[in-house]
Image (cartoon, rainbow, N blue to C red):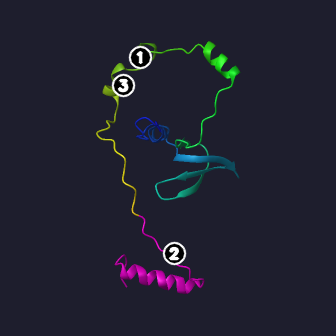
Amino acid sequence: QAVDGDTAQVGPEMAEHLGIPQITGALSLSYEDGKFVVVRENENYQMTLACAAPLLVTVTKSEKEPRFASIKGKMKARKAQIPTLTVADLDIDPATVGLKGSPTKVKKAFTPTPPEINGEIITEEDADAAVDMLFEKLVKAEVITR
């Protein structure tokens, strides 16, 4: 997911081409009992997902402060030789590269309005009574019918 256009297309497209599952927007990643465990978030809540390899995981932009490079790291970076490749250096059709070759076009970018969160917590300790209360509320809200 690029943080410039933030269209989140590259990871899912790669996973589709590779034919493997994907988990997007990871906040953390661990390996437990033969599976990768990913904590991700959306606008309203965090969720924990588990998936066996192979899989593709994209990460979300961290709100944490970046680490500062050490003097040794800065010196090494200053001397680094970074190779530059052009389309001519690669074995690909030039018509498939860049804006003209992109299979997707961003028509509009905007900041979404925050979702309206209307919720109620049922604190009834008796499970049967809590289910009955929830059922009545859903019927009253016309989410379900009797």
Q: Which residue is mark 1?
A: 87
**Of residues 12 and 81, which is closer to you in this image?**
81
Residue 41 placed where, x, y %?
52, 53
Seen in the image, is 73 located left or right of residue 23?
A: right
> 10 Å neighbourhood of mark 3: few (<14), some, or many (≥20)?
few
Q: Look at discs 3 and 2 and give the one toward the viewer.
A: 2
Q: Residue at image x 54%, y 87%?
A: 129
According to the picture, the residue beneath numbered tag 3 turns out to be 98
Single out the residue that lies furthest toward the left: 107
Of the numbered discs 1 and 3, the one sitting upstream in the chain is: 1
What residue sits right under mark 2 in the picture? 121
Q: Residue 20 at x, y = what percent?
A: 52, 43
Above or below residue 79? Residue 70 is: below
- For the residues labelled 2 and 1, the Cα–Cα distance comes to 57 Å
With 28 as the anchor, is 142 left or right in this view?
left
| Residue lying at 40% horizontally and 40% vertically, measured from the top left | 7
The part of the chain drawn in magenta is 117-146
Residue 71 placement (x, y as % from top left): 69, 21
Q: Is residue 40 left or right of residue 96?
A: right
